Amino acid sequence: MTETPEDILLSSRRFRVEREADWRRLEDLLERVASRSARALTDEEMLELPRAYRATLSSLSVARATSLDQSMIDYLESLSTRAYYFIYGSRSTMSERITAFFKYGWPAAVRAIWRETLISAAITVAAAIVAFVLVMSDPDWFYSFMPEMFSDGRDPAASTEELRRTLYHEGDESGLSVFATFLFTHNARVALFAFALGFAFCLPTIFLLAYNGFILGAFVALFASRGLGYELGGWLLIHGATELFAIIIAGAAGLKIGWALANPGELTRLGAAAEATRKVSLAVIGVVVMLFIAGLLEGFGRQLITSDALRYLIAATTGGFWIAYFYMTGRREAP
């Protein structure tokens, strides 16, 4: 005989009356732990918590087997999950979590989006090549790619000697800390926009990566046309090895989310986006660390270090470090 909705509702009410005390007790213990800490529980309550957890699991098993109402099943699943993570989950200290992030979490998150990272880098490089070729053929293209606020006198109207002087800091060091802060804020904004705009099915992220590539290519073409390509390389790469890598990773994270939205598979679009965001979140947190380092190199190291050879050495060292860190280290050993 098939049960009617009224029969199911009646069975659910009886089931709740018989077992609800265990659920409420478990929920009360978890709430006290969440609002304060595990120290809020007495020794007796700590021993009681696993018993209440097992009773709730038993109720969940019966509820699923007898097809009770879905809201009750959802409640029991949520309560059981919370209890499981408290009882069996690892409770590490903040220093342990930070160590695990740098040792395992961050590099693993970057390795997980290696395909998107290659695409992000390819977009940037392709745009840079296009801008380089156009500016080399006609310097007026420079103004189409380079915002005036970024050129700061470094444009085709400047003489070769004026361009050369902009590559080396002359004068005192006052104001460099403010300059570093400004650059860090700007670069962080670019990277985080490249990540956040991925929610619009990748397109804004692609445009932003290409825009950065256009600026880079136009800038290189200007100095190369005056025989200053080598000098500009050191000026750019001392911080660019870190900064550009950070922006490319942020763009890769945005592409990962955008692709998940465009092709959610068996999940809903919202569910696919949430899952992709969870996977790339550690990579994006790490991007902020990279941009902070790039900001220091750009605001201080690039201005105080005027030796081209030393600039290239620092660029090669930082670039090699990031590649080794992300793709050659930080792997957990198999148990």
Image (spheres, rainbow, N blue to C red):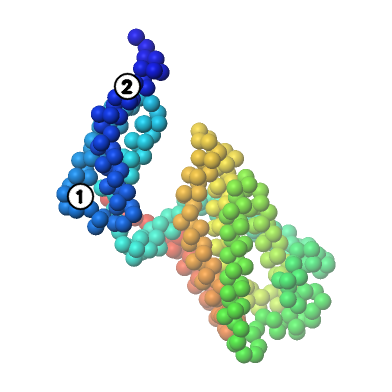
163 relative to 101, above or below: below
SS type, badge 1? helix
13 relative to 224, above or below: above
Residue found at x 71% / y 62%: 214
What label sits on residue 46 in the rendered view? 1
- Determine which quarter of the picture holds residue 66: top left
Residue 275 point in image, percent of width and height: 48, 44
Q: Nearer the viewer, mark 2 or mark 1?
A: 2
Residue found at x 38% / y 58%: 104
Residue identifier under label 2: 11
Q: Residue furthest bottom?
A: 172
Callout 2 amino acid:
Ser
Residue found at x 74% / y 62%: 131
39 vs 248, nearest the viewer:
39
31 vs 302, nearest the viewer:
31
Callout 1 amino acid:
Met
201 relative to 162, above or below: above
